[in-house]
Image: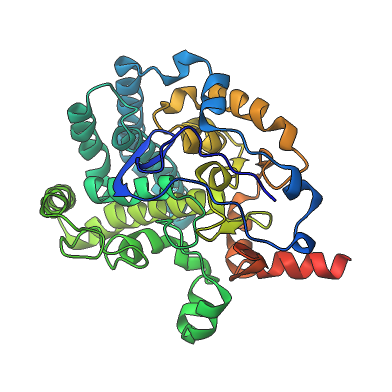
């Protein structure tokens, strides 16, 4: 049997994922997997997963320290990069459609970099003052038409229940029983190359696919009046920024081509990065009796994109495993913290729970291919799921 620890938490404590705190109560007492011995691998029978505290002790204490000056520097740096790209737009347009496309790609990359700074704010890793974090978070998110408070809630639930088949947020884990009932258009949507440009908005944030609308205060995402008020505040900030952009653009046409289109490239980059952090041929997803916080986080994948993108996007790509274990770590400490995570997971290298890292210069092609290949999950054993194609390829290899 896979032995799971309670990770130093009481069974009646609020749900906690490293440093994530979600206002809900569930039992954190780990139940041993109920699998037949014939279904288990030798590795699974012997594995005793580390505790959260074991990972924390392996990371230098200064990695958890927030530097407000440094955080503000990155905020200014990303805004400056976006401002420069707008200033340099005529140079890009000199090269016609190719130049305009290149400009949008860069806008998407630096827009996502700004999003990562706002992402630090919602986790409380921008500064020690959460009120300041929330203000800066709105400053970073609102120009990107991304509602800060609503995504703070859905994203924290994702961290608290990573790779939980029912409770994970932001990632649609489709099982075979769900796939069979899907209408044809849904089955065809993910494989379509253009889908990445619309999945963030309007599909996820506006229409609320899988988690509920992040703009409508009475969507399924919100259960308290205080959350609904926060939704309205964040939505108003987004609409205000879009309105200011329209006033500056001077026409709806300019607004669309020079505000909304680059926003869609930002949304595409966000979708690519977040998808590839968790979707992979080797990843497992767990039902309630099999899931634990540590087990779920070990299925996260660090990916090195190259071309300077990892540094530009503040190492949220190749430092994501560390971020998932401890989201209070500022982005500028993630790589150093990753070294500690790797040391703890080193004994698990040949198991399902080893540290996962890939060099993916082909990240865009991989994103497109995985959206075609990794269509739905099936049971590997009771309570443990993997993508259909992965299990079929393993069966053929035997």
What residue do we see at 46% from left, 86% from top? Answer: 183
Q: Is residue 102 left or right of residue 241?
A: right
Q: Is residue 205 above or below residue 334?
A: below
The percent coordinates of residue 224 (x first, y second) are: 15, 55
Q: Residue 348: percent from the left, percent from the top?
A: 72, 37
Of the pair 132 and 365, the residue shown nearer to us:
132
Query: Does residue 359 appear in the picture of this structure?
Result: yes
Report the number of discs.
0
Q: Position of residue 237 (x, y in %)?
A: 14, 47
Q: Is residue 78 above or below residue 96?
A: above
Q: Nearer the viewer, residue 242 or 298?
A: 298
Question: Left of 109 or right of it: where is 114?
Answer: left
The residue shown at (22%, 46%) is 149
Point out residue 215 in the picture as x, y percentages from the top left corner. Answer: 20, 59
Visible residue check, residue 248: no
Could you tell whether 54 is left or right of 100 in the image? right
Query: Could you say which is closer to the camera, residue 142 or residue 294?
Result: 294
């Amino acid at each position: 049997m896979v032995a799971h620890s309670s990770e130093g938490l009481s069974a009646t404590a609020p749900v906690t994922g490293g440093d994530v705190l979600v206002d809900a109560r569930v039992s954190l007492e780990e139940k041993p997997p109920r699998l037949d011995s014939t279904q288990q691998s030798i590795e699974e029978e012997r594995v005793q997963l580390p505790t959260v505290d074991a990972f924390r002790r392996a990371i230098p204490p200064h990695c958890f320290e927030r530097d407000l000056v440094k955080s503000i520097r990155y905020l200014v740096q990303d805004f400056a990069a976006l401002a420069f790209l707008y200033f340099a737009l005529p140079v890009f347009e000199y090269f016609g459609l190719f130049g305009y496309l290149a400009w949008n790609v860069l806008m998407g990359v630096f827009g996502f970099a700004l999003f990562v700074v706002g992402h630090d704010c919602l986790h409380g890793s921008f500064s020690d003052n959460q009120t300041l974090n929330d203000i800066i978070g709105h400053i970073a998110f609102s120009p990107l038409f991304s509602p800060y408070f609503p995504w703070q809630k859905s994203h924290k639930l994702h961290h608290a229940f990573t790779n939980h088949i029912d409770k994970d947020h932001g990632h649609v884990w489709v099982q075979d029983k769900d796939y069979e009932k899907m209408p044809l258009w849904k089955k065809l949507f993910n494989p379509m190359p253009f889908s990445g440009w619309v999945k963030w908005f309007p599909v996820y944030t506006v229409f609320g696919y899988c988690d509920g609308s992040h703009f409508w205060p009475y969507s399924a995402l919100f259960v308290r009046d205080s959350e609904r008020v926060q939704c309205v505040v964040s939505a108003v900030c987004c609409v205000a920024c879009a309105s200011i952009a329209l006033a500056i653009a001077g026409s709806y046409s300019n607004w669309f081509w020079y505000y909304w289109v680059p926003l869609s490239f930002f949304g595409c980059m966000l979708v690519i990065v977040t998808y590839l952090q968790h979707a992979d041929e080797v990843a497992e997803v767990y039902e309630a009796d099999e899931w634990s916080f540590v087990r779920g986080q070990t299925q996260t994948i660090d990916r090195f994109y190259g071309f300077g993108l990892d540094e530009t996007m503040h190492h949220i790509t190749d430092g994501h495993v560390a971020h998932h274990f401890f989201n209070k770590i500022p982005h500028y400490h993630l790589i150093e913290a990753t070294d500690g995570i790797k040391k703890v997971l080193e004994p698990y290298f040949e198991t399902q729970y080893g540290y996962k890292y890939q060099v993916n210069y082909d990240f865009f092609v991989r994103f497109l291919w995985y959206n075609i290949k990794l269509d739905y999950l099936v049971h590997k054993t009771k309570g443990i799921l993997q993508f259909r194609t992965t299990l079929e390829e393993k069966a053929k290899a035997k």
